[in-house]
Amino acid sequence: MILSAEIVLPISKPLIFDGAVLIENGKIIELGPLDNIKSKYRGHECITFENAVLLPGLINLHTHLELTAINKIILKDKADFIGWILALVELKKGVSKSEINNGIKNGIKEITATGTTTIADITTRNTFSPVSACGESFNAIKNAGLRGTVFLEVINFDHSSADDYWNDTTKIIEMLRKNENDLLSVGIAPHSIYSVSSKLLKIARDYTIKEKMKMSMHVAESMEEKEFVSKNKGSIRDIYHKKFKWDGKRDFKRYLSSIKYIDKNGLLNKDMLTVHCVNLNEEDIRLLKERNTSVVHCPRSNTFIGVGVAPFDRLISNGINVGIGTDSYASNYSLSMWDEMRFAYLLHRKTNNSDIKAEDIIKCGTINGAKALGINNKIGTLDVGKDADLIAVRLHKKDIDIYRDLLLNTKSDDILMTMVAGKIIYSSGIEGLKSVN
Ligand SMILES: [Zn+2]
């Protein structure tokens, strides 16, 4: 099948006016000007998206679909990171299993309808909540035909119970991994430095290296975390740990920064997604670059919780791979990557001495996300041989820069089609559309 549009935006090369993409068996066979493709592949069915752009599907690098059920941002007059986490723990207690599952479904609906084709979702096992979700989002994502990695959250600060905790965790990981397929894989997400003991962190690290899995971790998110890591004091120790009866005794020393700590523990590598990275010093940035570690930028979540603004421009100018994530409904008002990318663009457009271009932001939401997940050979750009993960988006033509036009003007109802590996997982009433795998 040939899909054509006024503009094809491959990301890896210049845009093609009156372009077309030939898709067979879920893969991109060829792309170029429509006239060329049509004359070369006579007889192939051709669907044209009027006034639209075809571009790679978006990649949301950080979600907690299970929290969609909460459906309200925990926002206080005074920004308070620990207060936010504790309020979230309380809210989770009031959510039933069916509400969690409905929330996951609603979240996936929103994600596919806004042009996201790949997600990196965090799923939990029964920790603080009486309701055990146990990887609930995995099957829902699989059934929706989305691509992604589902990271099982690891959270336990009591180092004396690290082995027992891990034994239970591996059972869930193995159960989930039996259902992995070409599109969906399982990863491991130690929650954070302040909620996972050093012993457990190393056990999880060894397992992921042995099993060749990806990791995701909230890192350098708040000043409270920084105070805890570097001084072993502050509200994380005094309030947060008390709440969970963790006695404040920890099995690791003080480190100058969170990045330094996870590096010393062998977790800073190409398979780690460091989420947030708001508080970074120059040495941290150097280490991220040296270890080839990706950063997941969640600007709206950081702003809502009030932890600050990540040094996006310095990460980009230092050549670090930065992807974008929406985080959850507990700290955001939508799961739309368009909303997130637009916010990032406006926030960072002119920072210090660097100019962030709309094209840079769209790369963060596509190819950079694919690199972070280690699947840039399969997706992230429209190139021959890659899987057909692409979206059709209505053109507004309010701006001569097509990237900026898309970023500033795309609303949810402008997504005409969302396709993963040739399969249409969302469309808004385009006649003749059918999957091509
Ligand atoms: Zn998170």
Image (spheres, rainbow, N blue to C red):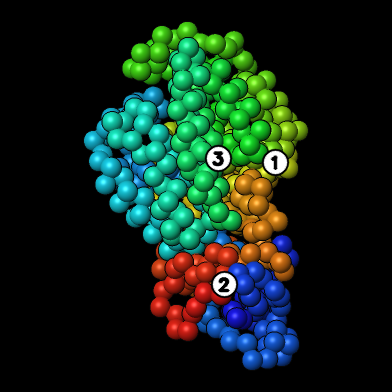
Q: Quadrant of the C terminus?
A: bottom right
Amino acid at circle 3: Gly
Residue at mark 1 to residue at mark 2: CA–CA distance: 35 Å
SS category of the residue bearing label 2: loop
Question: Which residue is at the front of the view, 136 or 30?
Answer: 136
Q: Earlier in the sequence, mark 1 or mark 3?
A: 3
CA distance for labels 3 and 2: 27 Å
The residue identified by callout 2 is 437
Q: Is residue 120 above or below residue 173?
A: below
Judge depth for marks 1 and 3 and give the one in front: 3
Q: Which mark is residue 187?
A: 3
Q: Secondary structure at mark 3?
A: strand
Question: Which residue is at a point 70% across and 41% down the rendered structure image?
Answer: 320
Q: Residue 320 shows which numbered tag?
A: 1
Q: Is mark 3 within 8 Å of ligand 1?
A: no
Q: Looking at the image, which residue is at 39% across and 38% down?
A: 134
Q: Is mark 2 within 8 Å of ligand 1?
A: no
Instruction: For the residues labelled 1 and 3, say whether their Cβ atoms are less than 8 Å apart.
Output: no
Q: How far from the left and from the top, in percent, is residue 236?
A: 43, 18
Sequence-wise, the earlier of marks 1 and 2 is 1
Report if residue 165 is visible in the image. yes
Q: Position of residue 17 (x, y in %)?
A: 66, 78
Crowding at mark 2 (Cα within 10 Å: few <14, some 14-19, many 20+): some
1 above or below 378? below
Of label 3 and label 2, which has the lower sequence position? 3
Would you identify the image quadrant in which residue 234 lies?
A: top left
